[in-house]
């Protein structure tokens, strides 16, 4: 398992998460002005909502890394390990965010969950471009979203961790982690 | 490789619609409030293009860079130079950025229809240089980072660098990014070239360092020296250029006037407003004569939108949509100091500004409603009370309160209603 | 028959197909899988390794279907597979990479670590066990890949073009290793290296555009007309002259061909 964690870049994932947590704690409240279509003035998006994208990318990179051929025919349940790695990381992030009450901490954890879920879904289509999907979604939400309006879809720019804003991120992560286990999807994937 | 296939295989194909959409969104917010000069349109286009294309092209560069790295370009003994190999992947992305820039210019062109002038090529060139620099940075990152990390990192990192400095109170940082906040300049101002040079230096150094990272071979010490030295050079050269600048990179405009004579007085407007020169003269020249008579100042020999001494040349403004009352109000207030004196606490001279503005505007011939709208009823009331006095007393009142606006040791007189 | 394909259909994308209906019993012993590029050799091996799942039909090893409930782990423990590209895992030495492959195949960590050195010695790479994989040459990395398939004592070893791009000395070394592996279990090797087929392999399967054109002993290959363009054997000075077996009209057809399951289709 130790080598599995090494191969799947667990150390880098931990460093990225720690750096993100530090960033959220130190400058998470800083607002970055963003032009938005739905607003008259520039919308201020807290850094804490954007920073998890990079941590999520490192996590997804780690989860999808590994020995393509040998893992494709492994006896051990490598898919479960990978799913577990992502799920545990996301769960830990949420737990830390709930315990450590830094401003926007919970919203940052929610975005980590959502970005990772979107990337996991995109990976079903194309692995090497998986993290482009949450990045594009974040930009679209910044352009079209109305922070504070409580829409279900613009959660990446919603500063409040209201339960309604968790629905889509949690669903994305759930689907993204469950889908690769479906035999029909797994069968046709070309081993790398 | 056939041209179509070469372009189709590039990330630029995906990047183009994204950055076009972003550019359109960014520009549509501001195109209605453009000033009547091409510089403001150029800055808006360049700013929107940098904000839209910078992050997207950097991400596309990270993708293409990783593609080249995976393709084994590093290890291949290519007959072409590394620069040539890079250029073939870089060109479609830059082509997409150029298309977006031209699209933005076309949009601005529609909004600027009828305004004489052309886009400022220097501003556009620096914008393109900034985009090239970030695209190269993407390539450099792509050589070492998997696209799963490189693409979002470059997208968000570049966007933060371009957008975040606008929120900082340390103003000079914003003048280094190339974003320009989408705004510069009013027609009587021009872009502060120092900001452009600083942006060009930062972008040039970034591009140079990124190219060195991309093309360096194992153990190339000279390349490492360049990679370390170029950012230092950028800081050393660019920061002093912008360190003293305020929130906006504007300086007063000194050239570009179109002049004519009216009733013995030379009237000058900015060349973008040349069509309105005759109308402006018909309003400003009689207004100036009335003001000279009322204040006892010598009549000006020149009224101009450009720099004026305040002695024999007075300033006015005739922007598009300005009514005669607005023109007269501008002319009248140009007789007042542009900035207050540096006085300690307790200086009350500023109280004279409103009543004096109202009195001068009424003397110049502006309507009472327009004056009230601009100065408020209290200032208008004080001005009307002054107007009720004999002419000589009015002149004394004006000169005393003008002194109060200029000096710290003179208190304003009779500028408030009892 | 070590590996059997029954009515297998497979395509990488919806609407595309590599095999529409593949029926084949791969002979026991050392088998070469030859055919032109794109004919499906790698896909066939990936199906046999259970890395891919057929859309229709069944793959099995001695009756064990990997995609029947509960069979997958048992099947994969019996089959080793070396895909075409062997990637060095960042930061891992050759021994760690081989040990990791063993661990993935269900071995305990200690056992995998012990066996990894033996596997590396089998592929004549024991001296480089502690070298990082990223520092190995292409041929050495290929041997690390081979060691990865051997570390868990698979009964069937599937090698996908193991000698592609290797110099003559490395090929010869590979042939020696292949001969050694063949003594321990079944071996299926996809290859374009048709020189000395008979000396290295017991039997051969010829694939051509999703069809099995021949499956039988190497000696019988010359008796089947029209295979030259598929195998390219003539251009390699001809089977007979290379193997020294001669390919007269009396070459024996492979028993499977008579059963209609394998052989010329």
Image (tube, rainbow, N blue to C red):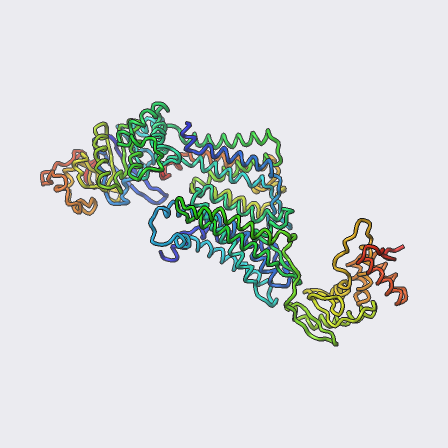
- Residue C164 vs B259, above or below: the answer is above
Residue C240 locus on image (x, y percent): 12, 41
Q: Relative to the observer, which residue lies in front, B342 or A1?
A: B342
Residue C197 locus on image (x, y percent): 18, 38
Q: Relative to the observer, which residue lies in front, B291 or B114?
A: B291
Quarter of the rendering occupied by the N terminus of chain B: bottom left
- For the point 28% across and 32% down, the residue is C125
Which image quadrant for residue C24? top left
Q: Relative to the observer, which residue lies in front, C162 or C140?
A: C140
Any part of residue C72 in sight: no
Which image quadrant for residue B3? bottom left
- Residue B80 vs A148, above or below: the answer is below
B94 left or right, relative to C107: right
Quarter of the rendering occupied by the C terminus of chain B: bottom right
Q: Which residue lies furthest to the bottom in this view?
A: B263
A119 left or right, relative to C103: right
- For the point 84% across and 59% down, the residue is B401
Q: How many labels does the image show?
A: 0
Any part of residue A86 in sight: yes
Residue C55 locus on image (x, y percent): 34, 38
Residue C230 locus on image (x, y percent): 21, 45
- Residue B294 vs C246, above or below: the answer is below
Q: Relative to the observer, which residue lies in front, B299 or A163?
A: B299
């Amino acid at each position: 398992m130790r080598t599995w964690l090494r191969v799947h870049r667990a150390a880098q994932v931990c460093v990225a998460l720690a750096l993100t947590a530090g960033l959220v704690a130190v400058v998470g409240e800083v607002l970055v002005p963003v032009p938005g279509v739905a607003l008259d003035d520039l919308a201020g998006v807290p850094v804490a909502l954007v920073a998890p994208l990079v941590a999520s990318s490192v996590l997804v990179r780690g989860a999808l890394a590994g020995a393509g051929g040998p893992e494709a025919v492994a006896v051990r349940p490598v898919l479960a390990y990978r799913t577990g790695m992502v799920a545990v990381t996301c769960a830990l992030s949420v737990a830390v965010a709930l315990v450590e009450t830094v401003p926007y901490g919970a919203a940052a954890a929610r975005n980590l969950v959502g970005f990772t879920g979107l990337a996991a879904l995109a990976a079903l289509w194309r692995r090497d471009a998986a993290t482009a999907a949450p990045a594009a979604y974040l930009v679209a939400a910044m352009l079209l979203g109305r922070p504070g309006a409580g829409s279900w879809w613009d959660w990446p720019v919603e500063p409040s961790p209201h339960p309604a804003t968790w629905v889509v991120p949690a669903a994305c992560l759930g689907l993204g982690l469950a889908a690769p286990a479906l035999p029909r999807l797994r069968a046709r994937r070309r081993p790398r | 490789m056939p041209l179509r296939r070469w372009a189709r295989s590039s990330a630029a194909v995906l990047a183009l619609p994204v950055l076009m959409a972003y550019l359109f969104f960014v520009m549509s917010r501001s195109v209605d409030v453009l000033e009547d000069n091409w510089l403001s349109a150029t800055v808006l286009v360049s700013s929107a293009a940098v904000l839209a294309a910078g992050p997207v092209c950097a991400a596309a560069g990270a993708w293409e860079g990783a593609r080249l790295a995976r393709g084994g370009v590093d290890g291949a003994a290519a007959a072409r130079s590394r620069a040539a190999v890079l250029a073939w992947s870089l060109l479609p992305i830059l082509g997409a950025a150029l298309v977006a820039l031209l699209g933005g210019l076309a949009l601005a062109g529609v909004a600027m229809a009828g305004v004489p002038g052309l886009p400022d090529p220097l501003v556009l060139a620096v914008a393109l240089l900034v985009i090239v620099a970030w695209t190269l940075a993407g390539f450099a990152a792509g050589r070492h980072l998997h696209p799963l990390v490189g693409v979002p990192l470059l997208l968000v990192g570049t966007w933060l660098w371009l957008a975040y400095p606008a929120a900082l109170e340390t103003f000079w940082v914003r003048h280094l990014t190339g974003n320009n906040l989408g705004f510069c300049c009013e027609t009587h101002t021009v872009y502060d070239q120092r900001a452009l040079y600083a942006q060009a230096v930062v972008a040039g150094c970034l591009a140079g360092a990124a190219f060195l990272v991309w093309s360096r071979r194992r153990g190339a010490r000279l390349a490492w020296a360049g990679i370390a030295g170029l950012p230092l050079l950028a800081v050393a050269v660019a920061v002093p250029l912008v360190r003293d600048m305020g929130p906006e990179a504007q300086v007063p405009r000194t050239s570009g006037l179109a002049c004519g004579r009216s009733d013995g007085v030379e009237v000058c407007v900015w060349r973008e407003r040349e069509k309105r020169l005759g109308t402006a003269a018909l309003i400003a020249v009689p207004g100036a004569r009335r003001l000279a008579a009322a204040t006892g100042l010598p009549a000006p020999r020149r009224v101009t939108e450009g720099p004026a001494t305040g002695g024999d040349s007075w300033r006015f403004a005739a922007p598009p949509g300005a009514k005669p009352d607005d023109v007269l109000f501008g002319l009248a207030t140009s007789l007042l100091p542009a900035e207050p004196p540096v006085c300690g606490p307790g200086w009350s001279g500023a109280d004279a500004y409103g009543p004096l503005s109202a009195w001068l505007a009424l003397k110049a011939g502006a309507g009472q409603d327009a004056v009230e709208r601009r100065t408020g009823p209290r200032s208008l009331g004080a001005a009307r009370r002054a107007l009720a006095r004999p002419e000589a007393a009015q002149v004394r009142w004006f000169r005393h309160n003008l002194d109060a606006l200029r000096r710290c040791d003179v208190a304003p007189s009779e500028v408030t209603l009892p | 028959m070590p590996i059997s394909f029954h009515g297998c259909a497979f395509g990488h994308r919806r609407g595309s197909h590599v095999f529409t209906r593949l029926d084949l019993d791969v002979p026991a012993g050392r088998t070469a899988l030859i055919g032109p590029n794109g004919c499906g050799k790698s896909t066939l091996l990936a199906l046999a390794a259970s890395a891919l799942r057929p859309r229709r039909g069944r793959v099995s090893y001695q009756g064990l279907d990997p995609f029947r409930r509960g069979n997958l782990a048992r099947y994969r423990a019996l089959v080793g597979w070396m895909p075409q590209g062997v990637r060095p895992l960042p930061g891992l030495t050759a021994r760690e990479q081989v040990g990791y492959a063993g661990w993935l195949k269900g071995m305990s960590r200690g056992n995998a670590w012990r066996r990894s050195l033996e596997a590396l010695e089998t592929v004549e790479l024991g001296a480089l066990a502690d070298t990082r994989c990223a520092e190995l040459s292409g041929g050495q990395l290929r041997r690390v890949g081979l060691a990865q398939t051997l570390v868990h004592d698979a009964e069937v070893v599937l090698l996908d073009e193991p000698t592609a791009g290797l110099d003559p000395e490395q090929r010869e070394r590979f042939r020696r290793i292949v001969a050694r592996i063949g003594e321990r279990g079944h071996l299926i090797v996809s290859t374009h290296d048709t020189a000395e087929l008979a000396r290295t392999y017991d039997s051969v399967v010829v694939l051509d555009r999703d069809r099995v054109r021949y499956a039988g002993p190497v000696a019988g290959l010359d008796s089947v007309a029209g295979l030259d363009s598929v195998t390219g054997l003539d251009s390699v000075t001809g089977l007979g002259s290379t193997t020294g077996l001669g390919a007269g009209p009396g070459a024996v057809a492979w028993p499977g061909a008579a059963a209609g399951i394998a052989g010329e289709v």
